[in-house]
Amino acid sequence: MAFQKAVKGTALIGGGAIATVFGLSQFSQYRNKHGTFVRVQAAEAVTVPIKNDFPTREQQILALRTTSEFDVLIIGGGATGCGCALDAVTRGLKTALLERDDFSSGTSSRSTKLIHGGVRYLQKAIMKLDFEQYKMVKEALEERAHLLEIAPHLSAPLPIMLPVYKWWQLPYYWFGIKLYDIVAGSQCLKSSYVLSKSRALELFPMLRKDELVGAIVYYDGQHNDARMNLAIALTAARYGAATANYTEVLRLLKTTDPASGKERVCGVRCRDVLTGQEFDVKAKCVINATGPFTDSVRKMDDQEVPNICQPSAGVHIVMPGYYSPDNMGLLDPATSDGRVIFFLPWEKMTIAGTTDSPTDVTSHPIPTEEDINFILNEVRNYLSVDVEVRRGDVLAAWSGIRPLVTDPNSKDTQSISRNHVVTISDSGLVTIAGGKWTTYRAMAQDAVDAAVEAHDLKAGSSRTVGLQLQGAEEWSPTLYIRLVQDYGLESEVAQHLASTYGDKAFEVAKIAQVTGKRWPIVGKRLVSEFPYIEAEVVYGVKEYARTAVDMISRRTRLAFLNVQAAEEALPRIVDIMAKELNWSEQKKKEELEAAKEFLYYEMGYKVKSDQLADSSEISLVASDIERYKKRFHMFDKDKKGFITILDVQRVLESISVQIAENTLHDILNEVDLNKNGQVELNEFLQLMSAIQKGHVSGSRLAVLMKTAEENLRQRVVIPVDRSGGGL
């Protein structure tokens, strides 16, 4: 009864407030405008022919070197830069794009994976009567609908639960969420709704029950950010844009305008990072879309220009899928320090984040232990006491740099703009900065509009509304069934291919290797617990992947899901890429080391070693120490004080169990802190202590040694797969 009264009161309070804030006439006008937005299919107005396939990277480099002058040259291969390339080329402009690393290698692959308007920004807009924030949310909600429409294979609506623990919060949050629906207008994905306590726990059983009043569920979008970025780049390439990754801009080229006598930017001097060759690319207009590196390009134009970018680091962690329901996210609207934390299912895992702290601009941001523990503590506050949130369950962690900007055209140049900013320098350099993933298309449109006007380019209006991205044209939710039936792929693998490549999944299936098994017929997995197959590595090279890091982090998402699995897959990935790209043995070794370093520092693998090292104070009771010593000495028969692969093999042979030597090497290497090829007694005790504390979980060595001890009596098979344990 109390719950029903609260909901009725909520409706009365919220309804009156909504009418007061907006007025029905404005709302009606808003809905009509957005209904038109959905019906418009700008793709029909595109006169530029689209190719069936995209050029090779070598062909793209040749086009960059031999084209006398482009209309537009974009620096930056993130979401905004690739969006600018697609917008410009579909207007009929001769377009080039240069990215010094890989497409989506920076911020665009390290997001929360949400396509959203920003509930918290709407709250601030209402509380502070900030019309600019309101407009930003409205635009983002428009673009959310657009993105879900043009890439349905890479994105989908996601229900997100906001748990309520105080009765007075129910009408407060309900009003805000309903307002979010109303601002979306006809673009509202699904209407939000209120849940009773029992229903909330039924849908999200991991939720903390104590003092729970009920919950509110609303809808936003979710996507595979790196693959979405790549789809934009590939679509631009198919329309004729000369796009090249691993092509670094060294400096801007300038010429003197004979009419005004002023210097004007007329192109760039760049370097092919893979070959070391340098060359000039001329263009009528250059667009700077480099995210956190905005100011470094602006200073190529003018050394004296003040910085406008104020970078902020956001850390995310990935945990096993059992921490959240398969299709329900969670929003913590007010963390202990006032930030917002999302807890979301993603790629059958659980993603949690983000933090927000000032940082220096770097190409290689590193997640900190402080930020990881902050997120874990916030997660503990919302999950049931029955769910032990362990530090060792962190499977991957990363930091992304959000490029917040101040508007140089604003009177208050110290004020952070939550919206995007377009500026044009005296020499004609167009800069697009700020904004968010969701609004990349609108940002690109504004940037190209500014470029067309400032440089008097012959082009019409933007044609990217409704323009489907690579893989979307023939995709359907049941496409994966055809992959299973026609090629003999596992259902999980087929679903993964369909949701990653869309209608291009058939191209991957065609090159998938025969397994030699009764089922599946084709599709050899890179690692057993993930649906990525070897054929994706071959196809990834076609998609411009040129390093092992490209493959584990952006063509597949292994590095973002489980760093240990990514490391395990690396040797096979490098072998396949070496064959496709004609790598030498030295190059293979370099790629393997570079990828391991990437996992170690940027994806949180370093934390694993740190967790063991930090457990140097072995907090085990005497009886546990004796028990673990006895287990250790069962392997260390010679009382050397350490065990090697030979010791483990000897014990396994005595119980008639065989494990491949390279697998054993990997298992011992996970615990071998000083990397001397052996596991010492102290290291083993540190491992067991860390496991007891929850700092480490799923250690294959610990499981193997325990099971071997039991098997000396029972003789059953020893499992050596990872058990979902993390860093």
Image (cartoon, rainbow, N blue to C red):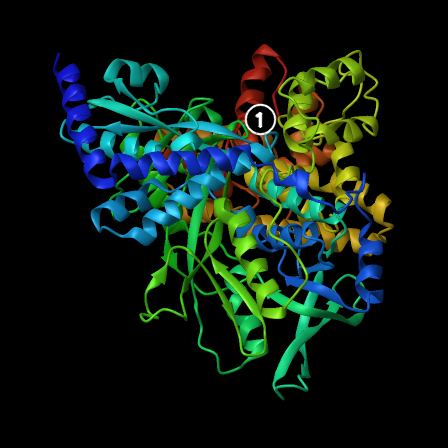
> Tag 1: residue type?
Leu
**Residue 546: image location, x then y, percent:** 75, 51
Q: Is residue 520 visible?
A: yes
**Residue 217: image location, x then y, percent:** 33, 25
Q: Is residue 334 left or right of residue 365?
A: left
Furthest-bottom residue in view?
Answer: 261
Residue picked out by circle 1: 704
Picture residue at 68% right of the left edge, 23% below the top: 493
Tell me the SS state at disc 1.
helix
Judging depth in this view, the residue of 281 and 95 nearest the camera is 95
Judging depth in this view, the residue of 721 and 62 nearest the camera is 62
Picture residue at 84% right of the left edge, 49% below the top: 581
Quarter of the image where one finds residue 587: bottom right
Q: Is residue 687 visible?
A: no
Quarter of the image where one finds residue 529: top right
Judging depth in this view, the residue of 645 and 45 nearest the camera is 45
Picture residue at 72% right of the left edge, 54% below the top: 92
Q: Is residue 196 above or below residue 131?
A: above
**Residue 373: image location, x then y, percent:** 36, 44
**Residue 146: image location, x then y, percent:** 53, 37
Picture residue at 59% right of the left edge, 48% below the top: 599
Q: Is residue 632 left or right of residue 717?
A: left
Judging depth in this view, the residue of 96 and 487 nearest the camera is 96
